[in-house]
Structures are given as structure tokens and as C-alpha cells.
Image (cartoon, rainbow, N blue to C red):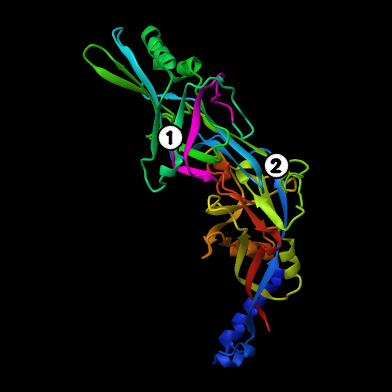
Amino acid sequence: MTLWDRRFWLVVGLAFFIFACEEPGEIGLELNPENGVFVAKYDEIPINTSVIQYENILSDNSTRIDNLNQSPVSGGRLLTGNYSTTDFGEFQSKGFTSIYLSKSGFTPDEGFIFDSLVLSIKVDYLYGDNFAGNKRIYVHELAEEIKIDSLYLTKNSTSYIEQPIGEFNIDISAYDSARVDTVYTTRLSDELGMRFLDKAKTDTIVFNNNLDFRNFFDGIALISEDGNNVIAGIPAESQSTFMRMYIHDAVDTTFFNFIFQGWDTTGVNITRYYNNITLNRTGTPIEGIPDYHTEYQTNNELSYLQASAGIFTKLNLRPYLNFLDTIDHLVINRAELVIPVKNYNNFFEPPSSLDLYVTDENNKFIEIYDSARMSISYATVGRIVYEKEKSENKGQFIGNITSYIQSLASGTSSDTLLLIGQTNLWNSVSIVNQFATVKDDIVLRIYYSTLQ
């Protein structure tokens, strides 16, 4: 008889017994737990951990249309910048995007004259170890196409012309995450702007079709200056992120917008954008990871997570199954996973939440295909949330995973291998937050009842 069978008949038998009795005291259900049939207990079960590096992290941030509801799923961020930490090494991100004509049929008369070409970006995310002073972000013209029908990963990159067509000089100290209008604007190359205007005058087809326009202009790359020590996140599909060309004639001044929105009104992907992310682990505790998807034990007491760079902590819940073997007639009341966070620099806040991804025997995500939406997600068993304690640099991730723990106990699930990572990774990377945890302090808290 299985553990689940034993529990079922235990509960059924107890129910008959209760209904046959006139007083609770007859079956030992008194206020004093010492006299009860069931007794509530609590245990903390240490969880085995290891570190792995995942090879293929989705980086394509372009909005997709939900084919079932015909609505956009979610857009992402262009991430540009760099920083270095002793735990993880040298981190760098470069943002690449094609652009989209905001309207078709742009046919300026011969009398129009070029004034300026500007790029506006909204910044809604910063991460790094230096939020002071000015940070320079260079704008480069791409030298090759970002293909609409390709899927981009963090390891992918697109070549760009070395000479910038513009640059931002951003005062990071003035950034305010609570503001919705943290927008920066810079003037781009006059040569590029005049090239746009001349093309619109001489080849109107290009400005009537996004495919033809992409063949004419591949897009841009946002590359931060070395030593910026901060990552800037730019929501590409914000109304505040766009390229604008100003022109005038003898009687009128007007402008034309180029935007980065990833889809048109029919749901067709007409632009693509993604981030190239690299991590140099030389000289760090995770330098010795032998190969992708291979478990690694660090030589210190810590485990590490930076999902944007493919670094994950793996959890093995086999100790919980061993615990079940020691107790008869157990009923789970509540189960919580607790992951403490190592002290961190104020600028390196951990993610706000983590998903618990099911992994196969090769330490890879288990993919779930939704045929109705024609989309892929990853199998998860729960979500844990970061709780910051009173101390400025301490906290823990904690989450209720009772249903999952019950499924392991009943035998309806045998998935005991999990990767912890930033939420919704199948929708691409939009943050780069990292953290380290004391691996021996990761525990499963079990609140349960058992026969006395």
C-alpha cells in the first residue's frame, strides 16, 4: 500500500470514528495536545544545492501577440552597461534593435530640408555599484540585419559600425525610479538624418513598407562606455522611446518618428530587439564551473544566482523524501521554502521574486507548449518572494509551496530537482539582479500533523 493509500484510509476511518462519538473528548480531541489523536509538528529540512551554468537563455524581448486573445503578451527592456563583483565577475550587456516606421506613406516634397535626427530613451531600471556622476551610452548603427524569423539568445550578437552615430551623457544621480518621465534625448548623426530624408524623397517605396525599410537601415546598438559600473534598462516599446527626424520647408516644420514597437496591428512581428549578455567569471568562486548544465560545488559556504548570465542554484529535494520515510500517517499542513540572502552592497538588491523551475536529468528547463497560444513556457512548481529584514543588507526569499510538497508526498509528482531563477524567464531577460546565499541555510519548513 502506498503512502497516499495509507493516508486516505486513515482519514476515512477517522471520519467514521468522529461521527460515531457524541463528545470530542471520546476521541481525544481535547484542548490539551498531549491527549490528542493527531499532534501538530514542525521540522526544518536542509536542502541539497549545487551551482550550474545554463547555456541558452532567451534574450529576444520583442512583444508577441497572444494568438488566443489577440493581445500583446509583454515587451521587455534593452539592457546596456557593465559592472564587476567579486562573487560573479565582470558582467556586460549590449542592446540591439531594429526600428519600425511609425506610419507609412512618408513622402516629403523636394523643398523639405533636414534639421535634426534625435533619439529619445526612457530609463526605468538601473542596477550596478555606482549611481553617481555621468554615464556615457554610445549609439551605433548596425552593420547587419536582426532577422525577424530568428530567435535570439543572450549569447547572440549583431555586428555594428565602430564609429558612433551619437551618445548619451546621463546624470545617473538625478535618476528617480518613481518618476514616469525619466527620459533622455540626444542628437544623432546629421549624415544619417540626411540619408533618411534623401531616401524618402527618391525612393518612396522604402518608407511605405517596413521590410523594405529594414533592408535599407538595419537598426541600432546601445553600447555603454567601459567602466560605467551600472546597467540601464530601456523599455523599447515605451511611447517615450523613439527616433525622430525634424524637417522643414518654407512654410512648415514637421517631424517623422521611427519607433521600436515589436508588432503591428495584425500581430505580425515587424521589429526585433534583444540583449547580448556576457560574464567573465575569472577569479571568482564560480570560475571552476566545468561545463554548461554540469553541477558544481563551490569551495566556500555560498551558492550563487544570476539567471540573466545563466548562473543558477539547483535544489535537490531528495532529503524531503527521506524525511517522509521516517514518519507514518503524515498530513502536510503547510510547507515553505526559505533561502537566506548573503549581505550585499546597497546597489545590488536581489530580485523581488524567484520562480522554482523544474529541471530534467540534464539540468535543463522542462518546456511546456501551449498550442492555443502557440507559445512555450517552462514548468514551475511555485514562486518565492524576497522579504527584506530590518537590517539594510539582509533578507530572505520565502514562499508557500504546500501543493508541490503534497504532490511529492502523494506520489503524483516525482520532480525533486529544481532551478531557482528570475520569474518568467521564457519571456526573456528584463533584469540582471544577482545574489548569493549560504547554501547550508536553505531549508524546507514543514508544518504537519501525525498520529500520536
Residue 433 in view: yes
> In this view of the protein, which residue sits in the foreground, 339 or 407?
339
Instruction: Determine whether label 2 and label 1 are within 8 Å by CB.
Output: no
Q: Residue at x 53, y 21 (%)?
A: 142
Tell me the CA gap for discs 2 and 1: 32 Å
The three-letter amino acid code for the residue at tag 1 is Glu
Magenta stretch: give its range: 123-151
> In this view of the protein, which residue sits in the foreground, 3 or 252?
252
- Residue 113 appears in which quarter of the rendering? top left
The three-letter amino acid code for the residue at tag 2 is Arg
- The tag on residue 237 is 1
- Residue 237 appears in which quarter of the rendering? top left
- Residue 314 lies, with reference to residue 167, above or below; the image says below
Q: Which residue is mark 2?
A: 281
Q: Residue furthest front?
A: 133
42 horizontally vs 178: left or right: right
Q: Earlier in the sequence, mark 2 or mark 1?
A: 1
Assign the N terminus to one quadrant of the image: bottom right
